[in-house]
């Protein structure tokens, strides 16, 4: 069965700091990888996704993620965070089945 | 266009009661998914439909949970004899198909279920 680990449960950063959120998955076959974001009071929204091709994926709002197959990782990055990036971030994977398997989420708090 | 909608947004019920949660997917999306999110956790898969049929119901926790999608559009998640442990946010998502790259799932706002 597939599983997803997010190592950082709560991250606090100052505005303009760089962000990297870890995500590791376990599954031996072909996977689709996703990062979703949930802003306070809003529903889950897709930030970016990886299906195939270039392992460096760019998403909305300046976010990017790199798929490293040998490490089973799909870490999320942003060079300079803004206060409006305060949210919960979920990494997810879907393999042969259509269902998404999510990590437990990382709560990001950006301070002014 | 309209996104995924879910009703009610909040539902409070008493232990032992029956509840129905409704999901209206994005028009034209053939696949519909239900997830459950408990406090401090990521969403957990319950069931998904391809058209009218349940293609994978492996995430339903027990036989008190049932879902239908009779016309291939709106879906209802039904929970019998609710228990306090059923309290969670129930999320619905839909996707155009289940084939890459059209299998991106769009989520609704969720129904917060509280069982007293």
Image: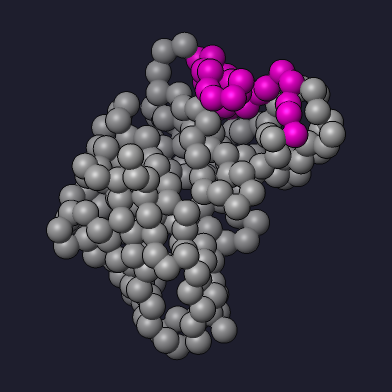
On the image, which quarter does residue A105 sit in? top right
In the foreground, A86 or B49: A86
Look at the image and tell me in which quarter the C terminus of chain B lies.
bottom right
Left or right of residue A52: residue B42: right
Left or right of residue A17: residue B11: left
Can residue A99 be seen by looking at this rendering? no
Residue B87 place in picture, x, y as percent: 54, 72
Image position of A65 with respect to A21: above or below: above
Q: Residue at x 53, y 18 (%)?
A: A58
Can residue A28 be seen by looking at this rendering? yes
In the foreground, A70 or B57: B57
Q: Please give the range of residues in magenta.
A: A55-83
Q: Residue at x 25, y 58 (%)?
A: B74
Q: How many marks?
A: 0
Residue B93 place in picture, x, y as percent: 38, 49
Residue B8 place in picture, x, y as percent: 42, 68
On the image, which quarter does residue A29 sit in? top left
């Amino acid at each position: 069965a597939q599983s997803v680990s997010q190592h950082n449960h709560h991250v606090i950063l100052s505005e303009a700091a760089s962000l990297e959120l870890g995500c590791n998955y376990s599954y031996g076959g072909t996977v689709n990888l996703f990062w979703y974001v949930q802003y306070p009071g809003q529903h889950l929204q897709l930030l970016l996704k990886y299906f195939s091709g270039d392992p460096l994926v760019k998403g909305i709002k300046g976010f990017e993620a790199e798929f490293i197959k040998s490490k089973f990782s799909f870490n999320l990055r942003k060079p300079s965070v803004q206060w409006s990036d305060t949210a919960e971030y979920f990494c997810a994977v879907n393999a042969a089945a259509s269902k998404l398997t999510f990590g437990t989420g990382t709560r990001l708090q950006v301070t002014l | 266009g309209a996104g995924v909608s879910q009703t009610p947004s909040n539902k409070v019920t008493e232990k032992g009661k029956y509840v129905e949660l409704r999901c209206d997917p994005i028009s034209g999306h053939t696949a519909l998914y239900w997830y459950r999110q408990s406090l401090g956790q990521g969403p957990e898969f319950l069931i998904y439909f391809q058209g009218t049929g349940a293609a994978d119901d492996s995430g339903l926790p027990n036989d008190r949970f049932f879902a239908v999608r009779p016309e291939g559009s709106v879906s209802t998640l039904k929970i019998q004899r609710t228990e306090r442990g059923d309290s969670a946010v129930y999320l619905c998502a839909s996707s155009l198909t289940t084939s890459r790259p059209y299998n991106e799932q769009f989520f609704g706002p969720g129904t917060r279920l509280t069982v007293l």
